Amino acid sequence: MSGNLRIIAGEWRGRKLAAPEGDTTRPTADRTRETLFSMLVSRLGDFDGLKVADLFAGSGALGLEALSRGAAHCLFVDQDAGAIRAIRRNISNLQAQARSDVRASSVLSLGPAKEPLDLVLLDPPYDTGAGSVAIDKLARLGWIGESTWVSLETAKGESVSLRGFEADATRDVGKARLHLLRRVA
């Protein structure tokens, strides 16, 4: 897709990101990312020291944005070879290797977590239900705990209903709908 992806804020503000070649991925638009991160900042305060996952990562823009804003570590997962190449190139360009873990696999093939993450960012293909399936499985495997924030991007008309989760906020931006979810006990 377009090669004008940029980091919005933080340490790498304004730095360009490579997008995967071809049309198998749909990078989150800058405006959508900006809206998402302002929603997250208003709830988290800051990203300092957070452990984050960028799932269905594409270019890695969401996870790299979190790292730029001070997150301690990000796990990037995508099964598309072009996406993995773009993520690795972006991490290398930003010299973020020490704070990054890239896995070329399906999100659903992740095993049990050592501990829950602070923030899970999911941008799956629209209108597939893949995000809900992934969230349900990740919660059962311990990646998503009671204090984890979950961001799911879907198509504008797509609704999300997950047992054990409640929507803290839902916002439409362009063709996207952003859902901020929390586990409920």
Image (cartoon, helix red, strand yellow):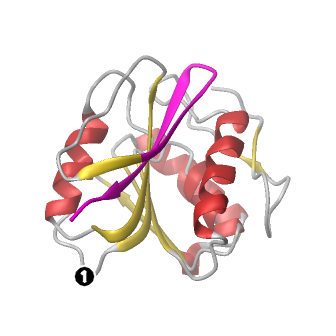
Residue 27 visible, this orientation:
yes
Task: Name the quadrant of the C terminus.
Answer: bottom left
Residue at position x 70%, y 68% in the image = 69
Q: Position of residue 147 (x, y in %)?
A: 38, 72
Q: Residues within 10 Å of mark 1 (few under 14, many from 20)?
A: few
| Quadrant in the picture for residue 33 | top right
Left or right of 70 on screen, residue 49: left
Front-most of 130 and 15?
130
Rendered view: 7 above or below 45:
above
- Amino acid at dot 1: Lys
State the residue position of label 1: 114
Magenta stretch: includes residue 170: yes
* Label 1: which secondary element: loop
Rendered view: 17 above or below 41:
above
Q: Position of residue 162 (x, y in %)?
A: 22, 42
Residue at position x 79%, y 66% in the image = 10
Left or right of 66 on screen, residue 163: left
Q: Position of residue 140 (x, y in %)?
A: 14, 62
Residue at position x 19%, y 50% in the image = 136
Rendered view: 81 above or below 68:
above
Front-most of 51 and 151?
151
| Quadrant in the picture for residue 53 | bottom left
Which portion, as a residue range, is magenta? 168-185
